[in-house]
Image (cartoon, rainbow, N blue to C red):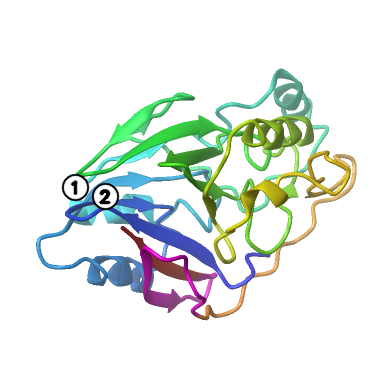
Amino acid sequence: MTFRGTNTYLLGTRGIAVIDPGPDSPGHLEAILAALGPGQHVSHIVVTHAHLDHSPLAGPLAQRTGAPVLGFGRHDAGRSAMMQRLAVEGLVGGGEGVDAGFAPDIALADGALIAGDGWQMRALHTPGHMANHLCFDWQGRLFSGDLVMGWATSLVSPPDGDLTAFMASLRRLGTERWHSLYPGHGAPVTSPAARPRGPAGTPRRPRGRDPQRPARRSRHGRRPRRTDLPRGSAPATACGTNATSSRISLIW
């Protein structure tokens, strides 16, 4: 379900933002720290959403570096009234891969600006794949998490996922011009205008399931391979784990 693993991005020159630290893997933690160069330190830990392949390593990384964890909120933050009602009434299954213990140190509202050493990002609340899902705009380059991926459409599983919100988030992306997308899984998307919309001009429908059907078990990704990144970025260490595979990319 994660293709070749979760992408972890390091943004900056001296004070580094770690975007989606990944699963709780000691090996991947050490790989992130090893990717830092002389004079560099982790200043921000930024999480797109609370799934087990994106957020659990945020806590251990914060303990090692002292950097704050930033995200929209807990895993159910941002749920629509309809999804909240379905969850309370027990009318949906869902819950696949949710990091129920995720709690950011700093909650980011839609439009919030995050500034670091020579960089600034704008947070966009883009629910659908997950209620607390955020994308991050960096100079017209979007860290798109699992809203738009580099290899397939995303999975939407109520009540954490919401198809209506997902389609609205895709339409929102379509109102801005993006230079490129850095997804949570798969290679960078270098022609973003062609991705959020299908051939008929409407947003692509994600993989989803009927809320009345049983939850489907997820399958873990394979060990990562390096792929070419756009000019201006450089690949760093990639680390495979038993739970899922992860990769690190340096973005300057």
Q: 107 or 211: which is nearer to us?
A: 107
Residue, x 17% and y 68% (percent of image)?
Answer: 37
Percent position (x, y) of residue 212? 90, 40
Q: 9 or 49: which is nearer to us?
A: 9
The C terminus lies in quadrant: bottom left
- The image shows residue 222, relative to residue 124, as above or below, that is below
Q: 69 or 226: which is nearer to us?
A: 226
Residue, x 58% and y 58% (percent of image)?
Answer: 190
Mark 2 nearby-residue class (10 Å; few <14, some 14–19, many ≥20): some
Left or right placement of residue 170 versus residue 119 in this view: right
Tell me if residue 19 can be seen.
yes
Percent position (x, y) of residue 103? 41, 37
Tell me, yes or no, whether the highlighted magenta stretch contains residue 243: yes
Left or right placement of residue 245 versus residue 192 in this view: left
For label 1, the SS is loop
The quarter of the picture where residue 186 lies is: bottom right
Q: Which residue is mark 2?
A: 62
Dot 1 amino acid type:
Gly
Residue, x 54% and y 52% (percent of image)?
Answer: 181
Left or right placement of residue 101 versus residue 167 in this view: left
Mark 1 nearby-residue class (10 Å; few <14, some 14–19, many ≥20): some
The N terminus lies in quadrant: bottom right
**Residue sitting farthest toward the top:** 81
Tell me, yes or no, whether the highlighted magenta stretch contains residue 43: no
Residues shaded magenta? 226-245
- The image shows residue 209, relative to residue 92, as above or below, that is below
Marks 2 and 1: in contact by CB < 8 Å?
Answer: yes
Percent position (x, y) of residue 92? 80, 37
For label 2, the SS is helix
Tell me if residue 23 can be seen.
no
Q: Which residue is mark 1?
A: 66
The quarter of the picture where residue 38 lies is: bottom left
